[in-house]
């Protein structure tokens, strides 16, 4: 608080209000308040104590440095303020932040703990308070004088000048208080008397030592200084200033109202203010006495050694001390650095203005850190309150849950009785709710991949495919036993004796038996399995059974086909509906012979399993699409031992996989019917495809058989297909024989498992007047192109299951064209063996002498492409 330089006008009850007051304790000088002087210029101490985090800056005179030569008498370190008043010597009140010990040496303020800096409010800054400095500084004097003081008009004593210069400020006080303030101090409490001194005399330490004590009792403030605690004096000073600030603000507020009835209240507060001023004066004197003692002791110490030498040594010491302090400050780590504070943008956005204080914190990093810490404390308090509220609400919710649990436990028997009574209705309406409920109860014991498959397949069947039936098969008791911990059994003495006899009779198993046991344990399946039944429009059903290998963490599938009508047995159609080849390459490259989990190979090496393909007949095929239906994904780059089942992965592949499975079943059934006709030499052509061929085709299919991959690879005219990668051991291979007269055309057919999306590939060899194939006859190559390249013309109605028979029919057609367009050999007597019956625009064209194999409908002639 800046003490006003003029207080007499504030105590005058006849002064009129001069404008609205400003903040309490801080009147704003201006034209409306001429009785308030501007504050003195701030002093810059030459040596300030260490500045704490939250402590205000020191005020008043600097602490006397014992290593600096004393200032000569009659000089001051600061220039007095010039404000038009009688010139007096002005000294600031000594800083309460730097107490002086009884010996006169400065003592460092006690350290402030970090917690107090972080969580306590900083003390208010205390600006310097100025007082009139007397020419002489006696310990006790009856009438303090100053070169510019005037005698009081009421009491005749020399007092501090008022705002008008020389008038005593006690004129408006009550007579008893005025007498107490203006009476010379000649008698003190406790019977002590003050000895008057001449106005111009000074008190020095040497004269006080030489003076002999007399048997006169008097009051000495010097001895009182040694008994008083400077820290307590500072606390008293701060409390007095705060109280004086409050009283000044109240007086100003009462005066600003302009009500005459407030005069008594103003007098009362004026009296209280005078008492506080007296306390401040006494504290000021005590501070000056402490300062003087320190200066005297410093002066005596300085004269013992050479001033220049001591100054040099102390400068070096001060440099070292400052370096240490700088190092300490640089190495200092506050606890608030460990706290993760919010960002500055969030702080200024969310913190209220009274905490953020942008006008101050944006320019001062220290105040900014304090404000952020205050905001952090405020947030933590709010979170603590919110946490308590959440705990309270949690307890309420738990109580509600307990009540609802009791209600639900009593509701279950009633629901069971209702479900039992509704069984006839469910059977009549074909709504098996009870059966579905049992399925869901059983599904709780499924392993995660099978459970994901069951849930996703059931959801897809209910939403998109009513002909998809999902069920769970297997022993529920065995599934429950897998998750039960083994119970500790205590055997009796008789049981232990029996076991000892059995162990003596047992033989140690051989290494081969141990490996077999480990292999069985490695390939162990879960006792529960999931079955999917895909029904087609013609009531044909594809049964899929999914198993889970617990130790390998993979899923396998077994397939079975049930037809609505008994189909004729075709020898060449034996592998079409075989469980081992029915689902091969449902997705390109997915043969189902190797495990998709890279970690299984390390497990196989431990038990001596070379490949899983030796066990697929018993366990099922581990196709990649089966793993995806169960939510399992195994990356090929890095093998992972634990792979979790993902519902989203299963859902993303469910619809496409079901469509592919149903399409595969329908295409195989269509091929099965076609093969039965082909074995009898009949090429079935649908009515929609009759326009693709001429009315009369002489060449006929004679033979249609299935051949193994090894026989196909040995044929000389199939090497190009094998080298192109169009023939693999997972494909189906057939041999067709077409004859016309003495000409015999052999066609080796490669049937891809993805038929009819992927067309069959034909390789031709004509036995007529020698052996002709694509390597030695360009027209044979052109015949192959007609069935292999232009197969899209033969697709027929969707989904294109007639593609194979249409290709065979076109092969018979182009064979007729080939034989009929051959020139007649003049060396052979008799008519031409194959007379021309097809109408052709040109018989041959180009240097390769290619024949016209393209049939034009409806004109009915053949032309070149």
Image (cartoon, rainbow, N blue to C red):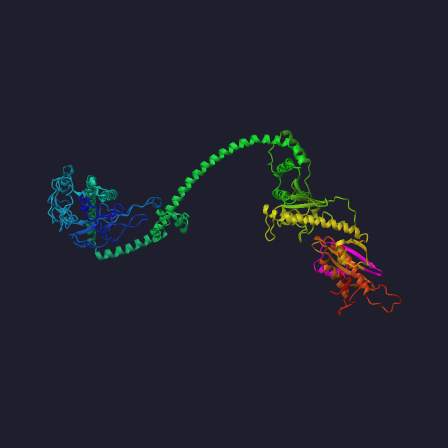
Confirm whether residue 14 shows in the render: yes
The reply to whether the magenta stretch includes residue 32 is no
* Closest to the observer, 22 or 99: 22
Q: Is residue 406 above or below residue 341?
A: above
Relative image position of residue 456 (x, y in whole percent) = 62, 44
Q: Is residue 741 above or below residue 141?
A: below
* Closest to the observer, 482 or 3: 3
Confirm whether residue 604 shows in the render: no
Relative image position of residue 185 (x, y in whole percent) = 13, 42
The residues colored magenta run 715-744
The reply to whether the magenta stretch includes residue 738 is yes
The count of marks equals 0
* Closest to the observer, 233 or 119: 119
| Residue furthest bottom in the image | 847
Q: Quadrant of the C terminus?
A: bottom right
- Position of 696 compared to 369: left or right? right
Q: Is residue 691 above or below residue 462?
A: below
């Amino acid at each position: 608080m800046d003490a006003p330089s003029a207080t007499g006008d504030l105590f005058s009850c006849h002064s009129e209000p001069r404008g609205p007051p400003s903040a309490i304790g801080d009147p704003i000088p201006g034209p409306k308040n001429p009785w308030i002087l501007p504050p003195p210029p701030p002093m810059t101490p030459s040596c300030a104590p260490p500045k704490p985090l939250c402590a205000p800056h020191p005020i008043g005179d600097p602490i006397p440095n014992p290593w600096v030569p004393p200032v000569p008498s009659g000089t001051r370190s600061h220039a007095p303020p010039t404000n038009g008043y009688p010139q007096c010597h002005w000294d600031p009140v000594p800083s309460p932040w730097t107490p002086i010990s009884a010996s006169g040496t400065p003592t460092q303020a006690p350290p402030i703990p970090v917690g107090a800096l972080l969580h306590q409010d900083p003390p208010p800054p205390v600006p310097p308070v100025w007082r009139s400095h007397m020419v002489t500084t006696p310990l006790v004097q009856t009438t303090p004088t100053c070169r510019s003081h005037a005698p009081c008009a009421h009491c005749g004593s020399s007092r501090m000048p008022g705002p008008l210069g020389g008038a005593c400020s006690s004129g408006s006080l009550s007579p008893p208080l005025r007498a107490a303030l203006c009476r010379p101090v000649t008698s003190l409490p406790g019977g002590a008397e003050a000895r008057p001194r001449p106005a111009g005399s000074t008190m020095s330490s040497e004269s006080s030592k030489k003076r002999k004590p007399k048997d006169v009792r008097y009051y000495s403030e010097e001895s009182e200084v040694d008994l008083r605690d400077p820290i307590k004096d500072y606390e008293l000073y701060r409390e007095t200033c705060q109280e004086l600030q409050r009283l000044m603000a109240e007086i100003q507020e009462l005066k600003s109202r302009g009500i005459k009835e407030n005069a008594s209240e103003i007098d009362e507060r004026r009296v209280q203010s005078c008492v506080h001023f007296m306390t401040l004066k006494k504290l000021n004197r005590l501070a000056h006495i402490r300062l003087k003692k320190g200066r005297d002791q410093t002066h005596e110490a300085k004269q013992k050694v050479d001033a220049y030498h001591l100054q040099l040594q102390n400068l070096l010491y001060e440099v070292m001390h400052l370096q240490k302090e700088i190092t300490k400050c640089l190495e200092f780590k506050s606890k608030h650095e460990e706290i993760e504070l919010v960002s500055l943008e969030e702080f200024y956005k969310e913190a209220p203005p009274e905490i953020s204080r942008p006008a101050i914190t944006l320019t001062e990093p220290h105040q900014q850190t304090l404000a952020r810490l205050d905001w952090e404390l405020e947030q933590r308090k709010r979170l603590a309150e919110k946490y308590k509220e959440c705990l309270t609400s949690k307890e309420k919710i738990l109580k509600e849950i307990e009540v609802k649990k009791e209600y639900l436990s009593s509701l279950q028997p009633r629901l069971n009785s209702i479900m039992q009574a509704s069984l006839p209705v469910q059977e009549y309406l074909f709504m098996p709710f009870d059966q579905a409920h049992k399925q869901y109860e059983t599904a709780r014991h499924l392993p995660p991949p099978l459970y994901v498959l069951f849930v996703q397949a059931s959801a897809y069947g209910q939403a998109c495919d009513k002909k998809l039936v999902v069920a769970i098969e297997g022993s529920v008791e065995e599934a429950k036993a897998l998750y039960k911990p083994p119970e500790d059994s205590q055997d009796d003495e008789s049981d232990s004796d029996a076991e000892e006899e059995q162990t003596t009779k047992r033989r140690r198993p051989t290494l081969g038996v141990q490996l077999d046991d480990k292999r069985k344990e490695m390939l162990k399946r879960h006792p529960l399995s999931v079955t999917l039944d895909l029904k087609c429009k013609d009531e044909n059903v594809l049964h899929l059974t999914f198993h889970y290998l617990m130790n390998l963490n993979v899923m396998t599938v077994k397939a079975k086909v049930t037809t609505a009508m008994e189909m004729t047995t075709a020898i060449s159609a034996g592998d079409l509906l075989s469980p081992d080849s029915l689902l091969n390459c449902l997705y390109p490259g997915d043969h189902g012979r190797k495990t998709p989990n890279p970690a299984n190979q390390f497990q196989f090496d431990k038990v001596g399993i070379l490949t899983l393909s030796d066990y697929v007949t018993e366990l099922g095929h581990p196709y990649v699409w089966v793993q995806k239906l169960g939510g399992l994904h195994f990356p090929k780059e890095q093998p992972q031992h634990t792979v979790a089942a993902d519902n989203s992965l299963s859902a993303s592949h469910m619809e496409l996989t079901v469509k592919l499975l149903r399409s595969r079943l329908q295409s195989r059934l269509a091929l099965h019917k076609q093969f039965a006709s082909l074995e009898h030499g009949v090429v079935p052509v649908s009515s929609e495809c009759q326009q693709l061929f001429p009315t009369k085709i002489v060449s006929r299919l004679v033979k249609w058989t299935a051949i193994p991959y090894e026989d196909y690879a040995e044929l000389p005219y199939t090497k190009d297909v094998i080298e192109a990668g169009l023939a693999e051991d997972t494909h189906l291979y057939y041999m067709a024989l077409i004859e016309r007269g003495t000409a015999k055309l052999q066609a080796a057919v490669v049937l891809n498992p993805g038929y009819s999306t992927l067309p069959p590939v034909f390789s031709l060899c004509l036995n007529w007047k020698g052996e002709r194939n694509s390597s030695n006859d360009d027209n044979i190559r052109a015949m192959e192109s007609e069935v292999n390249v232009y197969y899209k013309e033969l697709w027929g109605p969707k989904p294109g299951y007639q593609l194979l028979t249409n290709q065979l029919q076109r092969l018979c057609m182009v064979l007729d064209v080939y034989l009929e367009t051959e020139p007649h050999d003049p060396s052979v007597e008799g008519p031409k063996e194959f007379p021309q019956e097809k109408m052709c625009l040109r018989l041959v064209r180009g240097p390769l002498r290619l024949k016209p194999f393209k049939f034009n409908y409806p004109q009915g002639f053949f032309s070149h492409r």
